[in-house]
Amino acid sequence: MLHAIIRFSVRNKLIIGLLTLALIVAGVIDLKKLPIDALPDITSNQVQVITISPSLAAPEVERLVTFPIEQATANIPGRKEMRSISRIGLSVVTIVFDDETDVYWARQQVAERLNEVRDQIPPSAGRPELAPVTTGLGEVYQYVLRVEKGYEGKYDLTELRSIQDWIVRRQLLGTEGVADVSSFGGFLKQYEVAVIPSRLKAMNITIGDLYNALERNNQNSGGAYIEKGPNALFIRTEGLASNLDDIGKIVVRHTSSGIPVHVRDVAEVKIGHAIRYGAMTYGDQGEVAGAVVLMLKGANASQVIHNIEKRVEVIKETLPEGVVLDVFYNRTKMVDSAMSTVKKNLIEGALIVVFILVLFLGNLVAGLIVASVIPLALLFAIICMNLFGVSGNLMSLGALDFGLIVDGAVIIVEAVLHGLMLVSLQKKLTQEDLDDEVEKVGITHDERRSIWPGYYPHCLFTHPHFNRYRREDVPSYGANSFFCVDRRVYFVANICADDGCFITPKK
């Protein structure tokens, strides 16, 4: 097969040139599509089920929530392992699937099981929910909301958190590539009914009566419709509480004399906040509210951050006067720094290899022919990286070995130079003679020293690297194996064609 490739390459230089040009065009197009990130995301293919149970201790969480979920999801096809934690008020079940399993199919299967298990979990124990489709490296953007000087009395921590949840977060969730926005800091606003026990006792009312009254009298309902001539009048009632006064006016019960007892008669209705377990501070400005933007698994980090930045500029215009959105973490800086390191290493490595080749081969054209393997192999690797879903990062691109890439080409070019030098001492070579001699050097002249020493080690290097990439999903192995695949074909075909076209022996 190698004989046929070399013969075809030497006799059909135009076709090899067009194929090389097509490789360059396809590589440049895929280079623009290549996902760029600072580090590879090697998180396993997993689905998390989170249940919040504020009123339960760890043993009850394990017995009532975690165990039923584990039992219901134990027989999902493709499940690799399962682990869980049960804490006071929290249950987290992590289901790990094979790498070949589609994450959205896995989430659908888990969701179907959760619909069955919800009947087994008491309503007071919480409601199981799926975690966002993100990973441990999905935190790409973080910001805070703070109050400008002079507006401190206008916005408190509760108002900041409400602005975050109802203005900023809701707009960010529509951004392409964003999986979720996790809010932090401030006080989570609640309408609080603080019961006064002495009044409950005086009115002969239980807490259950008060709870049921609030539940029954805080909803809208609809009825049928009334036909009036050609029109239909739809019936609806509005009973949803919209402010503190509406909650205070809810009737709990009537006394024996028919006097209504309202919520405000037995409790204090006020604005409160949920129990919090931490706080967010910003510099020396005290407490603030903020959030972490999570990226979808497998998304292009650079593109997602660009989309977030554009949306944030629009959001800033909708914020109330005196509220400022400050970004304190942006993955772009980390990505740019990593890519700068990669570019520096690639450029310096390529220049050093080219210099050494020209110096030791003693022929500028031969050195450049060998060095042309580097950019073409890089473009081919980028095409394969897009095909197999490998992102460009510090591990996949920063671990490339240029010396390993050009070794086969050096063997062939050196053998061609040596053969042409011997023949040129006997006669003047025409282009056809050059082609014949290049073909002879590549096929008949000491074949074991010109072709196989450069080709066979590539096979030994490529196969285990690619197998390990497929088994362990390590980006550096994938990128290097893609480089070697191109090297195995290109240095045999194109190097021979270039030798016959450009190399002229020196007397």
Image: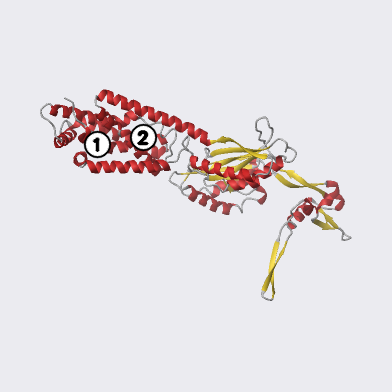
Residue at the spot 43% in from the left edge and 39% down from the top edge = 391
Q: Residue furthest left?
A: 426
Q: Is residue 252 or residue 302 the one in the foreground?
A: 302
* Quarter holding residue 250: bottom right
* Residue 418, placed above or below residue 290: above
Q: Mark 2 vs mark 1: which is more N-terminal?
A: 2
| Residue on which disc 2 sits | 480
User: Which numbered marker is on residue 399?
Assistant: none
* Quarter holding residue 462: top left
* Residue 228, placed above or below residue 492: below
Residue at the spot 82% in from the left edge and 51% down from the top edge = 264
User: Is residue 51 among the parts visible in the rendering?
Assistant: no
The location of residue 97, given as percent across then percent down, is 47, 44
45 lies left or right of 146: left
Which element type, helix, strand or loop, lies under badge 1? Answer: helix
| Residue on which disc 1 sits | 492
* Residue 175, placed above or below residue 394: below
* Quarter holding residue 486: top left
Which element type, helix, strand or loop, lies under badge 2? Answer: helix
Please state which of the two labelled residues, at mark 2 or mark 1, is closer to the viewer: 1
Q: Is residue 241 or residue 107 the one in the foreground?
A: 241
* Residue 218, placed above or below residue 100: below
User: Is residue 111 among the parts visible in the rendering?
Assistant: yes
Residue at the spot 82% in from the left edge and 57% down from the top edge = 253
Residue at the spot 25% in from the left edge and 35% down from the top edge = 495
Q: Quadrant of the N terminus?
A: top left
Report the amino acid beneath label 2.
Asn
Q: Quadrant of the C terminus?
A: top left
Report the amino acid beneath label 1.
Val
